[in-house]
């Protein structure tokens, strides 16, 4: 057979390909670092205290903190007590965005975090395990004059986690508790220009609703959304990379099908990797700019999960196929112990995502982080996922070490060959080892990106909303995945020539015995490269 491009391409051309891919990798980092703004932006809002003077609550009535339909405002609860306004008649109003600004579908999502300003009072302290009940409504409109349309209304509970760093004495009354940020709302799309939140804190002493929560002075919201400039750069990268991977994938599989032998497992897995890369590349997000597709966040997570599963499984099979003997290789069932946990972990990620973002499709105020059990579960999940990712990388390093040791065992056959033939096989071994080291580097960066992404998303819910990953890291890792998949499909595609065509027939005849000695086994060996066949023979021996 002709062999693969990685072993038949001249060193000069291979270096040119490598340098070109390296330049594109540098370009991917520079696009994020020099062109794209930071991935997300956070905006702080202070809720305006409005008075609902109506005796019977009207669900269609919305309270605006500013503008021509400005609500009746009060500055503090002391003013409300002086005017004998009950707590049930106070509405906290927040308009998103700020005045003279508007939201955009390019923002992709909107995450809102809640914070209470609670003053310490000796006669009204925060009880242990205090829970705040929030009656909240969300409305939208696309101009400044039309009526507000209700998007969702919900009654949610959030557990307070507050502490006072000072002694609880009369001298320290009026000092504020240090309270954790609370997850409040997450929208999967930002399809409208203006949003309005009306928040009530209903009090019912008989049912113990909002009793023992301290003296709430103000409500603050922190809105986090994706930057429109970053979204445009991200969409542009996807649009450019999709046809690139699609073309190389079709070209690769066409070369595979033109061979006289059926494709081996490694070639099938490489093709499947190309399909998963194409799936995550497809720029369907363009439609989210024109349509209110709230499920795009969930769909993006599913696509990323499929790609993670395929990429991690590919690395296991890629190494394993260079360790198995000919009786075990080329069978997917052999890898169930390694691939099974990857598929199971991905399924757990999917279930975890559905438990939160799946529910948020109908109720954006739902959060798995709102309860103690949910928070502990989510925290445990992130920690376990990070540990498993690190263990996977260590296991992959061990497999690569075994492959290197397996391949190095064949070097004992090289001194008996002619100089030209020996240099050829030494070159093949060097190329393969270099590719394996690049694979390890790619795996390390992927594990780091996965852990940082999970911790970053967790920090949003934990309250440290300033944590964010740089745009260069996002675009660089995304470009690295595409370039790696491109390189694997290109280098492992069947070559149209074989080594030795340019040499004389006499020399080829003299070396045929050496070729057979190095690549032939008792059982017939077929595979994409000489290294693949060599490793199979060594494992069998």
Image (tube, rainbow, N blue to C red):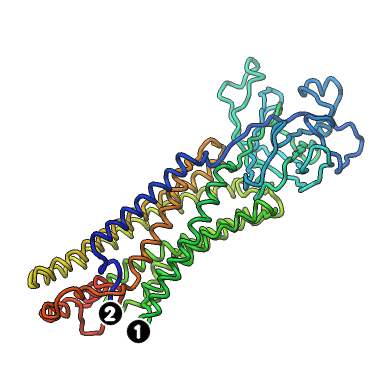
Foreground of the two, 52 or 213: 52
Task: Tell whether 227 sits left or right of 490.
Answer: right
Dividing the image into 4 quarters, which one contains the N terminus?
bottom left
Q: Are dots 1 and 2 in contact, CB under 8 Å?
A: yes
Up-down relation of residue 361 to residue 410 (above or below): above
The residue sitting at 41% across, 49% down in the picture is 448
Residue 204 x %, y %: 80, 37
The residue identified by callout 1 is: 260
Q: CA distance from mark 1 to mark 2?
A: 9 Å
Quadrant in which residue 140 is drawn? top right
Up-down relation of residue 225 to residue 446 (above or below): above
Residue projecting furthest to the right: 55
Q: Which mark is residue 326?
A: none
Foreground of the two, 229 or 391: 229
The residue sitting at 53% across, 45% down in the picture is 457
The residue identified by callout 2 is: 1
Label 1: few (<14), some (14–19) or many (≥20) C-alpha neighbours in 10 Å: few
The residue sitting at 33% across, 59% down in the picture is 395
Residue 20 x %, y %: 34, 54
Task: Tell whether 489 sits left or right of 221.
Answer: left
Label 2: few (<14), some (14–19) or many (≥20) C-alpha neighbours in 10 Å: some
């Amino acid at each position: 057979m002709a062999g693969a491009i990685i072993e038949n391409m001249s060193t000069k051309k291979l270096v040119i390909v490598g340098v070109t891919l390296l330049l594109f990798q540098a370009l991917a980092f520079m696009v994020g670092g020099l062109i794209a703004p930071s991935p997300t932006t956070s905006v702080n809002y202070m809720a305006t205290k409005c008075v609902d003077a109506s005796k019977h609550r009207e669900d269609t009535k919305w309270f605006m903190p500013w503008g021509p339909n400005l609500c009746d405002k009060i500055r503090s609860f002391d003013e409300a007590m002086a005017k004998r306004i009950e707590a049930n008649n106070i509405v906290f109003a927040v308009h998103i965005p700020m005045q003279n600004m508007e939201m955009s579908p390019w923002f992709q999502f909107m995450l809102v975090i809640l914070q209470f300003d609670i003053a310490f009072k000796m006669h009204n302290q925060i009880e242990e395990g205090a829970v705040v009940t929030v009656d909240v409504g969300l409305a939208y409109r696309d101009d400044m004059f039309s009526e507000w349309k209700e998007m969702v209304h919900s009654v949610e509970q959030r557990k307070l986690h507050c502490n006072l760093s000072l002694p609880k004495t009369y001298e320290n009354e009026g000092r504020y508790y240090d309270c954790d940020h609370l997850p409040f709302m997450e929208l999967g799309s930002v399809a409208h220009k203006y949003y309005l939140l009306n928040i009530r804190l209903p009090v019912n002493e008989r049912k113990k609703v909002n009793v023992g929560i301290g003296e709430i002075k103000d409500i603050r919201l922190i809105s986090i959304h994706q930057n429109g400039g970053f979204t445009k750069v991200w969409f542009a990268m996807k649009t450019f990379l999709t046809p690139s991977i699609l073309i190389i994938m079709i070209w690769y599989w066409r070369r595979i099908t033109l061979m006289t032998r059926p494709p081996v497992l490694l070639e099938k897995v490489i093709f499947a990797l190309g399909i998963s890369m194409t799936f995550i590349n497809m720029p369907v997000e363009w439609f989210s700019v024109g349509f209110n597709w709230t499920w795009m966040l969930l769909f993006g997570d599913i696509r990323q999960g499929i790609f993670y599963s395929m990429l991690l499984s590919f690395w296991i099979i890629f190494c394993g196929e260079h360790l198995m003997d000919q009786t075990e290789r080329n069978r997917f069932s052999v890898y169930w112990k390694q691939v099974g946990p990857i598929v199971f972990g991905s399924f757990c990620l999917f279930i975890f995502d559905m438990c939160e973002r799946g529910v948020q499709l109908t109720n954006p105020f739902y959060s798995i982080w709102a309860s103690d059990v949910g928070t502990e579960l989510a925290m445990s999940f992130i920690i376990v996922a990070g540990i498993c990712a690190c263990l996977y990388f260590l296991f992959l390093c061990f497999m690569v070490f075994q492959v290197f040791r397996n391949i190095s065992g064949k070097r004992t056959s090289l001194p008996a060959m002619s100089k030209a033939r020996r240099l050829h096989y030494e070159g093949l071994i060097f190329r393969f080892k270099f590719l394996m080291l690049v694979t390890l580097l790619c795996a390390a960066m992927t594990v780091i990106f996965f852990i940082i992404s999970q911790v970053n998303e967790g920090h949003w819910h934990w309250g440290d909303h300033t944590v964010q990953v740089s745009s260069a890291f996002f675009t660089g890792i995304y470009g690295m995945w595409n370039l790696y998949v491109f390189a694997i499909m290109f280098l492992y595609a069947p070559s149209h020539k074989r080594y030795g065509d340019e040499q004389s027939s006499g020399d080829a005849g003299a070396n045929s015995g050496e070729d057979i000695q190095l690549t032939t086994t008792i059982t017939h060996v077929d595979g994409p490269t000489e290294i693949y066949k060599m490793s199979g023979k060594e494992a069998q021996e």
